[in-house]
Every structure is written in C-alpha cells, then in structure tokens.
Image: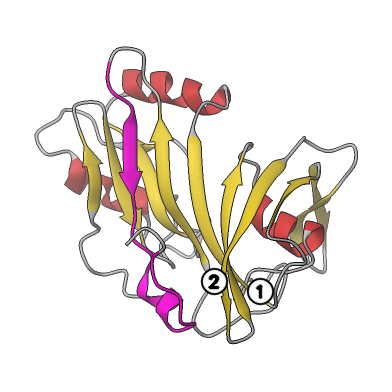
Amino acid sequence: MGNIAKPLPLLFRDSEALVIDKPMGLAVDPPRDGSDSVTARAEAWMMGYAEIPAPIHRLDRDTSGCLILARSIKAHRRLSRAFAEGRVEKLYYAIVAGQPDAAEGCIDMPLGKKSSAQMGWRIVPDQHGKGSVTHWRLVESRGGYSLLALTPETGRTHQLRVHLASGLGLPIVGDAVYGKGDPRGMMLHAASISLPRTTKEAIVAHAPLPERFAAFGFGDPNG
C-alpha cells in the first residue's frame, strides 16, 4: 500500500504555509488504530518556527498528493477562508475501469451522509444534500482503463469518489467503499493546488503522478 516511512517531499514552503506530497496510506489526522498520520509528523516540519504546522484541508487516507499545512494559527485562519469561499483551485487524476461515453463533462450531484449499523457511514447522492460539482476530462484510455482529470468546484467528503461511481458510473479503481478494492491501492491523486492570497503570491504546488499509476500504463500528463 505504498511506502510511508520515507520523509515526505515538500512541494512548497514559505513563512505562511507548507505543501507536502502525502503518500497513499497515510492518514491526515491520527487514526483510532494509533497508526501514523500527517499531524503526528508535523512537529518535524516546524523548522525553527514556534507553532506546529496544521493541515488546512483533508485528503482521504488512500488519496495521495498535495496537502497544505499552515505554519501558524493566524495563517490557518487566513488560508482556511480561501477554502470556505471556494477560491482554491485543485486538480486530481483518477483511474477508472472502462471508458466514459464522452470526452469531458460536469457532474452536478448533491451529496449527503448515510449511516447504518451494518455498513457504517458513507456518502450518497441526496437531492436534499449539499451541492457538489465536479468537472472531468478524459486524458487517455489504454488496456481497459481510463485516466481522468478532475477539477472539483466544491470540496465535499468523498465527493470525487461518489461522483465518479454514481454520477459517471465508473468507480475509481481500488475504491473498496464505492467500487472494488485493488491490491495496488486507490487510484486517486491530488496533482496540483493553487490558493490565492491577498498580500503574497498564490500558494501553487504540483505533485507528480505516483508510481502506482504507472502499473496501469499511465505516465504523468504534466511530466
């Protein structure tokens, strides 16, 4: 499920924020099982600063790629505002089994949370749920699989996973909750992020496509 013991690459660094390339399999917040997490490692990224960096947003445990951490409480408040106002631009890549019927499209599907004693909680399409919008584009198809570029307008929990599974009818490869598991892991990667700031240049970072995507024959579209 990926080597998460190595030091994590820093993709961006200034006085206000860091961007790390989070590997698949590493949780952002401390899991109940006591395993490793981004926040457990954050003290190592203080680098002389007084406060421990804290994540501004979240990636699922098995999603890899760009994760922004604020280097102070004040910075956390400022940068979180950009997320709340929908001003952050994000690009993800995902592999699905099969091929979509079109070259690109937009999934506008409200989402809600459903819980049951048997299955626990999951996110489901819900016309009374929170508005959720994802733009997608076919990058390449080969060997029965397709690489999609995803640009979400909103940042709901499991949004991309549910939108592809229920909106496009093509679950992400390796997504055991909304599709089918795969020993190579879940094929969802946060490839780039851009967060505008009023007094500084925007935070911009790019995380190269991880090796697990190469197992399906896909190289980095930006590389």
Whether 185 is drawn above or below 116: the answer is below
For the N terminus, the quadrant is: bottom left
Q: In the rendering, at what x and y percent does residue 37 appear?
A: 38, 56
The answer to whether the residue labelled 1 contacts the one labelled 2, judged by CB atoms less than 8 Å apart, is yes
- Can you tell which quarter of the image residue 214 is in? bottom left
Q: In this view, does 14 lie above or below 188?
A: above
Residue 176 is marked as 1
**In this picture, which residue range is highlighted in magenta?**
200-220
Query: Where's residue 121, x and y in %?
Result: 75, 57
**Residue that appears at 46% across and 26% down:** 80
The residue lying toward the viewer, choosing from 2 and 118, is 2
Q: Which residue is drawn at 36% across and 75% down?
A: 211
Residue lying furthest top in this view?
Answer: 199
Q: Which amino acid does label 1 sit on?
A: Ala
Residue 103: quadrant of the picture: bottom right
Does 202 lie within the magenta span?
yes
Point out the residue furthest to the left here. 48
- Characterize the magenta stretch by its predominant secondary structure: loop
Identified by mark 2, the residue type is Met
Residue at image x 57%, y 21%?
Answer: 85
Quickly name the residue at label 2.
Answer: 186
Q: Earlier in the sequence, mark 1 or mark 2?
A: 1
